[in-house]
Image (cartoon, rainbow, N blue to C red):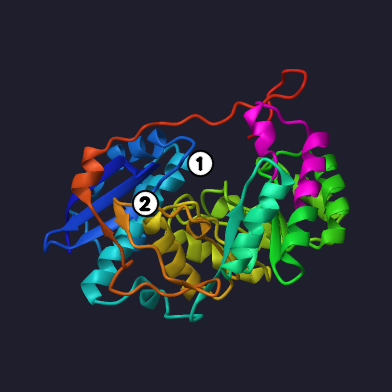
Amino acid sequence: MLITRATPYLTMDTTNPALFLVIETEDGILGYGEGTNLFTPQAPWGLLLDLCPYLIGQDASRIQYIWQMCYRRLFYRGGPATGAALSAIDMALWDIKGKALGVPVYELLGGLARDKVRLYGHVGGRTADEAASQARERAANGITAIRFRAFHSYDAQGLHDHALGVQQQLEYLEAIRAAVGDEVDIILECHGRYDPEWAVRLAKEAERFHPFMIEDPVRHENPQALAQVRQHTSLALATGERFHDKWDFADVAWHRYVDYLRPDVCHCGGISEMAKIAALAETQMLNLIPHNNAGPLGTAASLHASLALNSVVLMEAPWVNGEGRTDVVGPYPEVISGYALPLSGPGLGVDLDEALAAARPMTPGRYPELKAFDGSVRDF
């Protein structure tokens, strides 16, 4: 199965920026991968332009060899561009192998570890009442776990203040808990915005509302800062959406700074690397809750991994929020009672419209540029 073509597309999937990769073999099999990074979409695209020539003539069945070849050939490596570009390549190769053998990717990973994958949806809103109303709607649609972050009203002002952020997070948490009762799990997302002492204050106050976990309470650059939060709360902690390979996860896992690791299959090096991160987590009795803000292609890869890796307990599912518009690639998985069912067909089980992807160039967006009251820079 020699590779004859590797074409990256930096495109718009309806209204969302997306980075797709199509790899074609000499016998006409097409493999699809995704390496979308919403914050720096052109960086992994540029790296794919550099790497794709090295793929031509390689045997597409040698997934591990090609991963190592692409990673270790880079003298400067690591970070979001490398992670996303490798994710797209790896994903497309698994898709090709599944299609060549006529089986879903999860079968190649060892078969189904579970019949379906529990999902969590999102709520937003610029007030606690808006967030609570959305949470009530998600629960009515069968979603049993809901993630929220506050800050939306402050984002609109270009502001982040730790004290105001803690206060608003607690207001939202109280309102959502009242709206959905105790049967729905609530994920408290902090986006890494807090300094450790403020994350500790939030965790202590949040305990009375028993959230399922606190995600990214502090910035990700220094994982040891999580130890300070861990010492002062009994709540479960999670991190990892901004990690880009198994080495980024190693320190957090070995020291058990968190309870859940959150690799993203579009950012962490793909399906191959997620399986290795899961094995690393298993040695420390940690579980995975894959991060996923992708469209149907990245979602399909995340679902196949989540079906096959025993340590996965939840998967992020933004499309259940009613925002699942897509036309370049599809379909999304079927959801019943808050669980995603396996996709049908060989490989990843999705199709990509190359002509549409090529005809719709990506339009870069801008995210809020947050400052404190004194004008200093704060994290988004």
**Three-letter code for the amino acid on which mark 2 is drawn:** Glu
The residue closer to the viewer here, 253 or 317, is 317
Q: Earlier in the sequence, mark 2 or mark 1?
A: 2
Q: Which amino acid does label 1 sit on?
A: Gly
In the rendered image, which residue does mark 2 sit on? 34
Q: Is the magenta stretch mostly helix, strand or loop?
A: helix
In the displayed structure, does residue 54 sit left or right of residue 153? left
Query: How far apart are the two marked residues, 2 and 1, measured between alpha carbons?
Result: 16 Å
Whether 171 is among the magenta residues is yes
- Residue occupying the point 59% across, 55% down: 122
- Provide the residue span drawn in magenta: 150-173
> Looking at the image, which residue is at 25% across and 52% down?
22
> Nearest the camera: 6 or 2?
6
Residue displayed at 17% across by 63% down: 29
**Residue drawn at point x = 53 percent, y = 56 percent:** 321
Q: Where is residue 36 in the image (x, y as percent from the top left)?
A: 41, 45
Residue annotated with mark 1: 79
Residue 52: image x %, image y %?
26, 44
At mark 2, the secondary structure is strand
Residue 38 drawn at (x, y percent) = 46, 40
Asked whether residue 292 is in view, the answer is yes
Residue 5 appears left or right of 95: left
Front-most of 98 and 211? 211
**Picture disc at residue 128:** none
